[in-house]
Image (cartoon, rainbow, N blue to C red):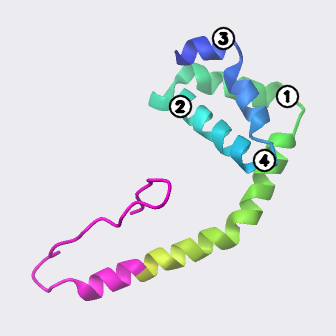
Amino acid sequence: MQIDLNHINAARTTLRFMTSKDEFTFRAAMRLLAALLVGGNRTIQMSLYKYFRTSRDETFFAETRDRLVRSSPTVVRLSQLQGESVLTLHQEMPPYGLGRLRRPPPDQLGHRHP
């Protein structure tokens, strides 16, 4: 399936959708690209590599840079929160082991968070 999608330029097209300012479109493109790359698919990797080597369009890189800059404060805060969670968990653990750890409940979308 991945190779068939590659033959119709799905990987390259997905890169164009990843430059979208619309968050839904961007996330859908990310999920599709991740699915195309499952298993380290060399054909898809080479297709992307060739695209980046031959294309003069730098929109993908500019948008990726902008997204990283915009998300930096969020990533830092999440990292801090995770550190606080680890500290809290460590403080609550009995000295002889992990005790009974429970997974957090899923969020509104059904996703579980570590």
Query: Which circle's residue, 2 or 1, is located before the other in the chain?
Result: 2
Badge 4 amino acid: Asp
Query: Which circle's residue, 3 or 2, is located before the other in the chain?
Result: 3
- Secondary structure, mark 3, is helix
Near mark 2 (Cα within 10 A), the count class, few <14, some 14-19 or many ≥20, is few
Image vertical order of residue 39 relative to residue 87, above or below: above
Badge 1 amino acid: Ser
Near mark 4 (Cα within 10 A), the count class, few <14, some 14-19 or many ≥20, is few
Q: Name the residue under label 3.
A: 7
Residue sitting at the far left: 96
Q: Name the residue under label 2.
A: 35
Badge 2 amino acid: Ala
- Secondary structure, mark 4, is loop
Query: Which circle's residue, 2 or 4, is located before the other in the chain?
Result: 4
Badge 3 amino acid: His
Q: Residue at 79% of width from left, 33% of height from top?
A: 16
Q: Where is residue 113 in the image (x, y as percent from the top left)?
A: 42, 61
Q: What is the distance, in whole Å, between disc 3 and disc 1 at their CAs?
A: 18 Å
Q: What is the distance, in whole Å, between disc 1 and disc 4 at their CAs?
A: 23 Å
Residue 22, disc: 4
Query: Which circle's residue, 1 or 4, is located before the other in the chain?
Result: 4
Q: Name the residue under label 1.
A: 55
Indicate yes or no whether the magenta region holds residue 68.
no
The part of the chain drawn in magenta is 85-114
Indicate yes or no whether the magenta region holds residue 96.
yes
Q: Where is residue 71 in the image (x, y as percent from the top left)?
A: 70, 64
Q: Residue at 14% of width from left, 76% of height from top?
A: 99
Query: Which circle's residue, 4 or 3, is located before the other in the chain?
Result: 3
Magenta segment's dominant SS is loop
